[in-house]
Image (cartoon, rainbow, N blue to C red):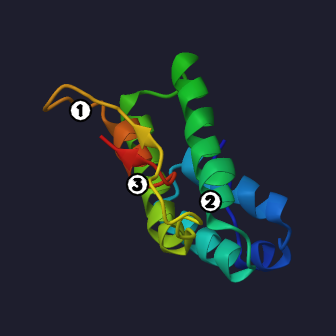
Amino acid sequence: MKREWNLEEMKMAKSKEELLEKLSECVLEMEEEEVVDVAEEYIAAGYPAFDGIMDGLVDGMNKASDLYDEEEYFVTDILLCSDAMYAGLEVLRPHLPESAQSGEKPKAVIGVVEGDTHDIGKKSGEDHDGYSWI
């Protein structure tokens, strides 16, 4: 199931859809180092960071979640996928546009029990999406 991306293949893939698929696959395959390269290529190509996050990184986590539901992935696999997602977020997050409105951002409330290790989604949501988190 593991897919190897070689440098020549990465240079040839210039379409937004191909790069989004690579971002998704890197997360799904727990490729923490490769996702950084793909995210940098995605930004260098001029594509929107928000789409890279939602249609690439988050898509990969959703696929990993499906594999977890099918008992093909385990908690450790999900944690490694989340490490890859966060590595991609570190590249894409600085390129998110500032809110177009100078007014108040929409508010969102989310919570987990203090000390709970199941806060992957909570941390991800707090890092982007243009919401004011409570």
Quarter placement of the C terminus: top left
**How far across and down, in percent of the image, does residue 34 sit?**
56, 67
SS for callout 2: helix
Residue identified by numbered label 3: 127
**Furthest-front residue in this view:** 103
Pick out the residue farthest to the top. Answer: 70
Visible residue check, residue 39: yes
Q: Nearer the viewer, residue 2 or 39?
A: 39
Q: Quadrant of residue 66?
A: top right
Give coordinates of residue 5: x percent, y percent. 69, 65
Counting every numbered tag in the picture gives 3
| Label 3 – label 2 distance at C-alpha | 12 Å
Q: Amino acid at mark 1?
A: Thr
- Who's the residue at 64% across and 69% down the image? 38
- On the image, which quarter does residue 97 sit in? bottom right
Q: Earlier in the sequence, mark 2 or mark 1?
A: 2
Compared to residue 109, the image places residue 103 above or below, namely: below
Label disc, if present, on residue 50 of the rendered structure: 2
In front of the other: 1 or 54 = 54
Q: Please name whichever residue, 117 or 33, is drawn nearer the observer in this view of the structure.
A: 117
